[in-house]
Amino acid sequence: MPTCSEALQLILDSVAPLPARSTLLFDALGLVLAGTQTSPETVPPFTNSAMDGYAVRADDCAGATPASPLFLEVLSDLPAGSVATDAVRPGTAIRIMTGAPLPAGADSVVPVEATASEGTRVRIAAPVKQGANVRLAGEDLRAGEELLPRGFALTPAALGILASVGLAEAPVHPRPRVAILTTGDELVAAAARPGPGQIRDSNIHTMCGQAVAFGAVPVPFPRVPDTREAVTAALAKARDTADVIVTNGGISVGDYDFIKAVLADLGAREVFWKVKQKPGGPLGYWLLDGKPVFGIPGNTVAAMVCMEEYVRPALRKLMGHARLLRPETTGVFEGSFRKSVQDGKVHLVRVRARREEGRLVVAPSGPQGSGILSSMLRSNALALVPADALALKTGDEVQVHLIEEPEDH
């Protein structure tokens, strides 16, 4: 039975980024580049106006003051998307819109609000610095320069950069498709009224929600009945349609727990079964035709903790991310926690973390039963009580995983 860190390492060692595919920019936000992107073009492609105003020669405006303004003859109007047919000559100007190419002869733009139109002339009441309000060709990007490195997770600005040089697609590692199978004859849909001995299936919603939050594509399966035939059919279909399989429940050794046996029948290689932790100890991990299979226990908090601690890092590696793990730090415990027995397991305690006087303070977010989802709702961190510790008290230092912060390693 591996420790938490050993189990995580076994998982990460078994997965690699999914093969790259060319993806439209509209679908690429957050995805990781599979190759370095260089610019095929210069941006801006031509020198243009940064403002609505008048394209002028700066020398023509020298000495202009409110008391002694200068007047320039306006040759024409130049909207964005057009090219001037006139050149700016001494004593003339062209009315220009933002983004329009700077006409020949002009070297500056006077903002429209600093001018006054008087018939066919424009009134200039202040000098303008040469090059003012002009965007030079190539001042943003130059052809051949590196835009984005391999491994970069695409942001909105990055999508705009690629689009600006004519790259409408990018080679990225795709979002993994995650088949999520909940098992158990006692489960009913959220909208159903449970009968005797039945409960609503909340796990399918928490786990699919986590998969989306992790950047993956959840593929929820209909609830799987507790029969060997149903489990076999569901796992075979998941193998054929998804990149990752996550099962929930049916992972123990009871008479109606078929996940392990069916995976063996299908030829899956067991990497480990059970981890020295609580909640989530009955976690199993297999490779089925090279695809990761997570067997997650059915208790709702255990399921969420296992998704956070193990499935999330694996999915991020499949997507090509370099940073796989949430921030880990040391916090000062506030309150009390005690294991029922000295069980040799790391206990992951749901806590609320806050900064106070330059230190991180963590306090339990509620009762710690593995089926109490409300304390998971109120938590923003997990405190890891060491395997050799029996209890925590106020003032004790404890390792903390900040589960609402972005990965940093």
Image (cartoon, rainbow, N blue to C red):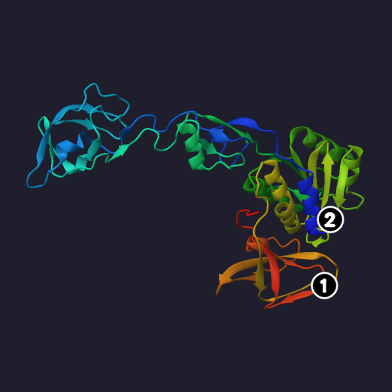
**Location of residue 242 with respect to 281 vertically, above or below:** above
Point out which mark residue 73 bears: none
317 in relation to 119, above or below: below
Q: Residues within 10 Å of mark 2 (few under 14, many from 20)?
A: many
Residue 282: give its label: 2
Q: Is residue 273 left or right of residue 95?
A: right
Residue 372 seen in render: yes
Helix, strand or loop at mark 2: loop
Q: Position of residue 43 (x, y in %)?
A: 42, 33
Q: Amino acid at mark 2?
A: Pro
Task: Give the residue at x 82% y 70%.
Answer: 388
Q: Is residue 28 above or below residue 348?
A: above
Q: Residue at image x 26%, y 41%?
A: 132
Label 1: state its secondary structure: loop
- Alpha carbons under labels 2 and 1: distance apart: 18 Å
Q: Residue at x 20, y 34 (%)?
A: 56
* Residue 191 seen in the figure: no
Q: How many marks?
A: 2
- The residue that label 1 is drawn on is 340
Coordinates of residue 349 in the picture (x, y in percent)? 72, 66
